Image: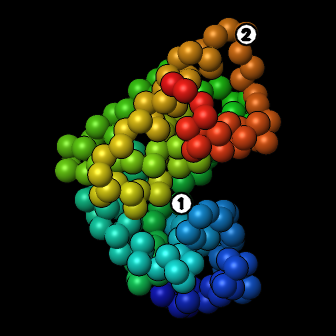
Amino acid sequence: MDLYDKAHSVIISANHRLLKHDPSLIPIGKGRSAYAFRIKGTQFALKKFFPEFADIAPLEASVYHELKGIEYYPTMFEYGHDYIVMDYIEGLTLFECLTRGVPIERRHIKEVDRALHLAVERGLNPSDIHLRNIILTPSGEIKLIDVARFKQPHDPSQWDDLKRAYTKYYERPLFPKKLPAFLLNRIAHLYKKDLIPF
């Protein structure tokens, strides 16, 4: 079965439930617009968009094409009208690092800044940078995923606010380095409503 057939084996309901997929696809995540799978026996990941978000696939593919060769982003191998196939990135999101107590070092923050700077140098406008789309690999490298919004008007405030929170709170010696997911989700909810001043 080729990648196109694997992608089209994925059946998603109108309310975004995963109904069916080829056994070679291992579900690894669900986001606001897509499911992600690891393709068994490979180092590939498949991102299959929900039907109403299928138009994001070619947009995100074009961004990955422009980011080609930058080590901080996965390489894209194929895309179709509602899916993308790219490198599988092993590791933990920064959100998972916080919930598991895995240290996030100052150098990791600087690496994210570098990754975003390199995208800007390619004429892109990185936005929607949050804890769930930054991955810390087992070897300590930083990778960024979910780049569809890199062609929208530039809004660096979210990443700048995360950096301020890192400096103001996380770096303090007595600040807990492990936080429950419900608390992080609550903070994110309040932030989206502009109820957390920075």
Q: Is residue 137 visible?
A: no
Q: Tell me which label, 1 or 2, sits earlier in the chain.
A: 1
Q: Vertical placement of 16 versus 175: above or below?
A: below
Task: Name the mark on residue 28.
Answer: none
Q: Quadrant of the N terminus?
A: bottom right
Specify the quadrant of the image occupied by residue 76. Answer: bottom left
In the rendered image, which residue does mark 1 sit on?
88
Task: Name the mark on residue 174.
Answer: 2
Residue 92 in the image: x percent, y percent?
63, 44
Q: What amino acid type is highlighted by mark number 2?
A: Leu
From the viewer's perspective, tell me whether residue 176 is left or right of residue 8: right
Residue 69 in the image: x percent, y percent?
28, 53
Measuring 30% from the left and 67% from the top, which residue is drawn there? Answer: 62
Q: Secondary structure at mark 2?
A: loop
* Eye-nearest disc, 1 or 2: 2
Measuring 39% from the left and 57% from the top, which residue is drawn there? Answer: 149
Q: CA distance from mark 1 to mark 2?
A: 35 Å
Q: Nearer the viewer, residue 164 or 95?
A: 164
Residue 142 in the image: x percent, y percent?
48, 39
